[in-house]
Image: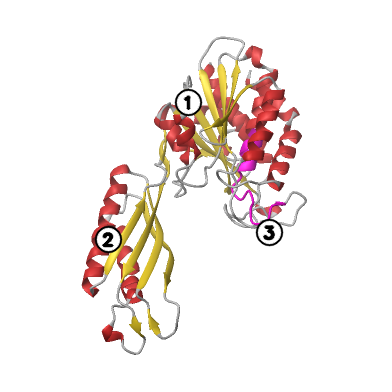
Amino acid sequence: MIKNFEAALEEINEEMIGWRRHLHQHPEVSYKEVRTAQFVAEHLQSWGIEVRTNVGGHGLVGFLKGGQDGPTVALRADMDALPIQDEKQCEYASKVPGVMHACGHDAHTSTLLGIAKAASRLKGSLKGNLIFLFQHAEEITPGGAKSMIEAGALAGADAVYGVHLWTPFPVGHVYCRAGAMMAAPDEFIIKIIGKGGHGGLPHQTIDSISVGAHLVVNLQTIVSRMVDPTEPSVVSVGSFHAGSSFNVIAETCTIVGTVRSFDADLRLDIKEKMERIIASTCEMFGADWELEYKLGYPPVVNHDEEAARFERVARSQFGEAQVHHSPLIMAGEDFAYYMHHVPGCFMFVGAGNEEAGIHHPHHHPQFDIDERSMLQAGKLLMGMALDYMG
């Protein structure tokens, strides 16, 4: 069965690459995926797949009933791009100023389309059903997964699988791990309120920049001195804004950053420690403060049985040497929400190629993938689904 599907995927591999390049030239940011969703829907419908549109936003759900009774497996791809200017010099570079697929979602979408086309040809031999989840808005909180689930996207599903093409890993290699694998990406915005004044009369002011500088240093002690060093976590300040003139002491300062963690209790503990440090630091200088703390996606936690399935399926498809235990990844993913409802597994498929110059990180203006990874991702996803169906 798997060999038949792999052969079908290989036959349409060039089509998948063509779809990917089309989508790469015509990207749409989160919550704006109108043409992308239409592109997907038209293809699914042309293959006789039942399609629901506008699921929780611009999301789509395709349903394919197999020729034999059995479980229902959901496969997911994300569709949105990023507000980044494409700096690649290639024939398929983005044609939309300031917008590009800098994370591989165009390839995820095209790979799942390829799976759908192959499955539609061989549906008579399917021992169960397939749900194709084409998700909008993965790149921005609250994300599309949650709203799609609330709109019934997972109805009837017994398991869910997803992949991320990942340029830090070399093409031809696949990665996964049981338990937590990707972090919860939280965001914080701190506003320090001091007392502005003349740069030559600092004793008459409460310098928000000075307070903010102390606070940035103090926040770093959360991970280095207040968290068990065996518990991976990060507190990073990414933005510090204050002042507008050389001779004016700034009254306010805004600090923006992110917290990353894998454990639900630790996640809340870091937030509480941050509040205490902000309050103490500002009190020391007589400043006031405000904190907006935005909980992002939960951590991606793979189910043990499904991670074991990955090990078995991937080794049979790619060989022992190509299958790896994934390191913890501090990036976040709203695929986590799906696995709160049904058993599942999220996997990485290597898409980098140093020799070909494909090595830029995700969200980089020159991001690209080795397109051979798409066929490998398609085979892995279908292998997982077929193995579950038995």
Look at the numbered disc 3 and give the secondary structure of its residue: loop
Question: Colour scheme of this structure image?
Answer: secondary structure
Instruction: Decide which of 194, 124 is in the foreground and name it.
Output: 194
Q: Nearer the viewer, mark 3 or mark 2?
A: 3
Tell me where residue 253 appears, x and y as whole percent. Answer: 37, 70
Instruction: Decide which of 41, 259 is in the foreground and name it.
Output: 41
Look at the numbered disc 1 and give the secondary structure of its residue: loop
Residue 290 left/right relative to 322:
left
Label 1 sits on residue: 152
Secondary structure mainly formed by the magenta segment = loop
| CA separation in Å, label 3 and label 1 | 39 Å
Q: Is residue 385 above or below residue 91?
A: above
Residue 89 left/right relative to 348:
right
Label 3 sits on residue: 87
Tell me where residue 277 appears, x and y as whole percent. Answer: 25, 63
Residue 265: quarter of image: top left
Label 2 sits on residue: 225
In the image, what residue occupies the spot 44% across and 46% down?
328
| CA separation in Å, label 1 and label 2 | 44 Å
Please say whether residue 104 is one of the residues in the magenta stretch.
yes
Residue 315 visible here:
no
Residue that sits furthest to the right in the current view? 91
Residue 209 numbered mark, or none: none
The boundaries of the magenta stretch are 94-111
Q: Quadrant of the N terminus?
A: top right
Tell me where residue 194 appears, x and y as whole percent. Answer: 30, 73
Q: Are marks 3 and 2 in contact (CB under 8 Å)?
A: no
Q: Which of the two labelled residues, at mark 3 and mark 1, occupies the earlier sequence position? A: 3
